Amino acid sequence: MQETGKKLLWNTSSLFTNKRFVAGGATTPFADVFAYAGAQIKHSLEIAKRLGSESYVFWGGREGYESLLNTDTKRELDHIAAFFQLAVDYAKEIGYTGQFLLEPKPKEPTSHQYDTDAQTTIAFLKTYGLENDFKLNLEGNHAFLAGHTYEHEVRFTREAGLLGSLDANMGDKLIGWDIDEFPNDIYEATLVMYEFLKNGGLPTGGLNFDAKVRRQSFEAEDLFYGHMAGMDVYAAGLRVAAKILEDGYFEDVLKDRYSSFDSGIGADFEAGKVTFADLENYIIDTPDADVIAATKSGHLEAIKATLNNYIYSVLGARFN
Ligand SMILES: [Mn+2]
């Protein structure tokens, strides 16, 4: 690091590989294993401080359950929340000021991971009062495993003010497990970079590839193509997203779609001025046909075509 000026984006610790962690690290039912996990994170935080790590990541590992029949879920969640607080306390004690991150994942290795997806993880942080000390590290493939898109996970986390860092791999939408593929999907990269820009970038984090080449890509050059394609697609996505944002295209779409809340009864509701009774008084004499006529097309075909056109025009101008 001294020779190259390279910095450490984040470090982490494996509380899942060794067989002592068969039932979890911070959510294990075994106090000695819990103690071992705490001691291990203590050392890992000391390494974070020594290397100036920008963030410290907790990946769920085996923090989840296989069966409700033998699991005290409340006790385990109380334990892991207190464990995270111990990490915050120790970081303060040694003067480590990096950003703590949780990385949601719905399954693998346990059948139900406690940090299943972004919204579940955000609710956990708020339930235990940890939302000021933790943000999220979002991985593309984990979004698909949770039944979402990557941009969904980034959107909801951004809106919660908890976007920390991006593990920019991608998954196979047809396979039910984690393949950690190098990203190469321009639509996904564009929409994720759109959220990234709406977030004002990643003040405490960055973009990394938690990725590997495919099983049948066994020649050395495949590794280079994987990295290049991944870097290129996110750089391209950033260019397209920047143009969309500069034009205010999606902002206009949303402004128009929700415009009925900008005046009249909609604005009164948003201002907290109306009750259910007010809503009833407002609408009771309006014929059904008029209420239906107040709906408008979502115009999704035109929106998707416009998104395509942004990709063609921004990247076409770049490559022609
Ligand atoms: Mn993964």
Image (cartoon, grey):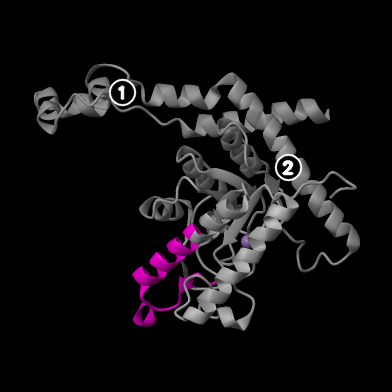
Q: Is residue 86 left or right of residue 49?
A: left
Q: Position of residue 67 (x, y in %)?
A: 40, 79
Residue at point 60%, 73% (across, down):
16
Q: Is residue 7 left or right of residue 276?
A: right
Q: What residue is disc 1 on?
A: 261
The relative height of residue 91 versus residue 258 in the rendered view (above or below) is below
Looking at the picture, tell me which residue is in the foreground, 284 or 52: 52
**Kind of residue at disc 1:** Phe
Alpha carbon distance from label 1 to label 2: 37 Å
Residue at point 59%, 31% (across, down):
200
Give the mark count. 2
Residue at point 84%, 50% (across, down):
1
Q: What residue is disc 2 on?
A: 233
Asked if one can make out residue 167 in the rendered structure from this viewpoint, the answer is no
**Does the magenta stretch mainly form a helix, a strand or a loop?**
helix
CB of mark 2 near ligand 1 (< 8 Å) = no
Q: Earlier in the sequence, mark 1 or mark 2?
A: 2
Dot 1 and dot 2 residues touching (CB under 8 Å): no
Please tell me whether mark 1 sits on a helix, a strand or a loop: helix
Residue range corresponding to the magenta coloring: 62-85
Determine the image quadrant of residue 141.
bottom right
